[in-house]
Image (cartoon, helix red, strand yellow):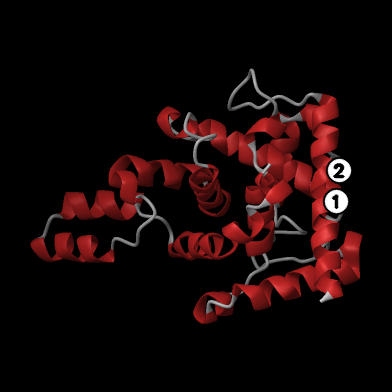
Amino acid sequence: PEIVQAGKKYLDAALEAVYAELRSLKAPSHAFRDRLLTDLIPPSVVKSIIAIEHMSGSTLITGDEEKFLNMFYTILATNKHEAYAYAKSSQSAFGLVQFIPRTYKNIAALRPDLLLPKDFEKAMADPFMAIKAEIGFLDNNLMLLPKEIRDNNGHDPKMTGKYLAAMYNGGPTRVRKAIKFWGADWDKNHAAELNQWQKEGNKAKYAAGSAAKLKRETYFYLLKYELVYNHFAGGMNSH
């Protein structure tokens, strides 16, 4: 439908404008000081996170990402600059990129070079500023990943994006713990292992594994990421 195409074009144009400004500012990555932000954070990941921040759990149940994306693009097309501008979650996450005030304040302080407004709600109501803040936040989280994963960023953007999506939702500390304890299975549910350790009375391992397991919400967040990433990973989206 034309309205869906209009929504896609709006999102593309918004990302292109933000990336163009970041290139003109020569904004550096904090994860790799000799690289630019625009070289490190793929638009496919930025768009995927924007989309899943507004995806309900029912989409996971039905697996109908196309229906969700059509609705997502329709909202963007019909509301443009005001699309999701005043969306607020029960956790006080706000706007297109669903930041909470503390996260925004931290990024604005860490990245004065991004020229973000001081006013949280004003910034979150402006998709251009909101996307800039998101990119800065993703780069900061990239910096916090273990070096071997960080260094693999350019080789597997989808997997790097998965780490960043998990950190976006559940925080870097929990994700780093999951990577350290569970290794390549950091993103799995691990209910079976934990139940087994509990039955065996292995309290130390059960406690450590539970503390290093992703939160239930983050586990489902990553399932949403898997649903939509490939949609955004073509053309300009893959950067």
Tag 1's secondary structure? helix
Res. 196 image quadrant: bottom left
Res. 23 image quadrant: top right
Is the Cβ of the residue at disc 2 closer than 8 Å to that at disc 1?
yes
Residue 25 vertical placement versus 2 (above, below): above
Kind of residue at badge 1: Ala
Res. 201 image quadrant: bottom left
Q: Residue 19, how many percent across, how many down?
A: 79, 38
Q: Is residue 120 visible?
A: no
Kind of residue at badge 2: Ala
At horizontal 53% and vertical 48% (from top left) the residue drawn is 158
> How much space separates mark 2 and mark 1, taking CA atoms?
6 Å
Q: Residue 229, how many percent across, how many down?
A: 58, 57
Q: Residues within 10 Å of mark 1 (few under 14, many from 20)?
A: few
Which numbered dot is residue 17? 2
Q: Which residue is mark 1?
A: 13
